[in-house]
Image: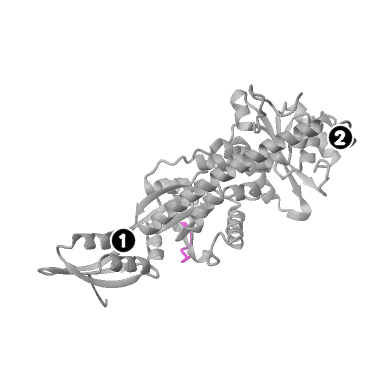
Amino acid sequence: MQGLPRQPTGKPVLATSLSEQKKVVATRAAVILPWERAAHGQDVRAAEARLEEAVGLTASIGLIVVRKAVVLLRMRRSSTLLGKGQVDALAAAVKADRVDVVVVDSRLTPAQQRNLETELGCKVIDRTGLILDIFGARAATREGTLQVELAHLEYQRSRLVRLWTHLERQRGGFGFLGGPGETQIEADRRMISERIVRLKKDLEQVRRTRGLHRQARRRVPFPVVALVGYTNAGKSTLFNALTGATVYAQDQLFATLDPTMRAITLPSGRQVILSDTVGFISELPTELIAAFRATLEEVAEADIILHVRDVAHPDSAAQKKDVLGVLQGMARDNMLEQDWSGRVVEVLNKVDLLGGADTLPRTDDTVAISAITGDGLGNLLARIDERITTGMEMVRYRLALSDGAASAWLYQHGEVLHRADQEEQTDITVRLAAEDRARFERQFTHVTAILA
């Protein structure tokens, strides 16, 4: 019996990614962007930018793009999405260019995907399948691997039927309705469902562990600064520049998927935790939004959100809109506080491609930088310092010169503004967050607070 590929044990292989296929032989690909005039208008530049993004996504997993095209749609056909003439022309091009896989930069229904594969004579994947495959190739940690597998299985479960079209499904069996393929489809769907249940349990454990880590950070506590932005905006490069880390950073889409955290020291001497997160993208698959909730929770817990933008990109404004749309969706789902926008600092990256940070006008809401050259990084750190300082309290403590523990605590958790040493005691004027002041006075009850 044919159908899902089988392992030696007889169990089906539930997912085979394009990234695994391309390791065996280079795969030739065509990238097609269906562009609806009614929905997008006549903006040719936007169509070209979206097509180049799709080509970048396709090339990022090693596929060789031999053809790319924007296909204008007057209406969406339920059977193939594209019109009959467009499908015929594409089939001829696929044959002429010896294309192995066609990437359609749109969401396809299972029927549309099956019909296009029949008409074109090659494998067809949609935008969701492509992004899932990229995530599968890049996830490195256990959490990332679990999230990707869950998203992939959720996506694949709805498309099992297209793998069994060679089997009879309307004759035989009980009641003349169930064919031999029906039982196999249900068996594979049940196996996928059972695996999904196990993955969700494993992910819940990972999220609980991450929650414990966040609680531990609150007890320290250090402010958390989260990097967000469109994919390939330069978040990981900026992360490395600020922390001295060696997080994987390349000029490609979705170079980093798993959240990474490092401590950095600000000009005031205060320490914060910097968190690098997965990049956003337009029309992010709903399966991934749900599966990567644990990653997005790091943004929800952040004291400051750095929105990193590729200011040199021709579609920078549209990318900003996509990122803000995801954050607004998180707020609607109560994953993010409603006043989240007040915590955002907009970081205009890649100014080296525009002539430097001084070429952009200075505003209170933005910081212009180049993560590659380091231009403007000092201004960015100062802005973070300024944001953290807002809302902090200034207080003066009198403590014994021999009380090194209390003195060290103030230096580690606050910003010491002034110190006056006397023979047996010292007065320290420090700026502290309200919760830090309460923690200090609970822990060091013998220390006297003096009005600053």
Q: Quadrant of residue 59?
A: top right
| Residue at image coords 81%, 47% | 76
With respect to residue 167, does 55 lie above or below? below
42 or 408: nearer the viewer: 408
Mark 1 in CB contact with mark 2 (< 8 angstroms): no
Q: Amino acid at mark 2?
A: Phe
Q: Amino acid at mark 1?
A: His
Measured from the top left, where is residue 334 in percent x and y? 58, 62
Check residue 360 for magenta coloring.
Answer: yes
Q: How many marks do you count on the picture?
A: 2
Point out the stretch of residues depicted in magenta: 359-365
Quadrant (top left, top right, bottom left, bottom right) of the C terminus: bottom left
Judge from the rendering whether residue 379 lies leftward or rightward of residue 408; answer left or right: right
Residue that badge 2 annotates:
174
Measured from the top left, where is residue 143 in percent x and y? 51, 43
Judge from the rendering whether residue 230 lies leftward or rightward of residue 42; answer left or right: left
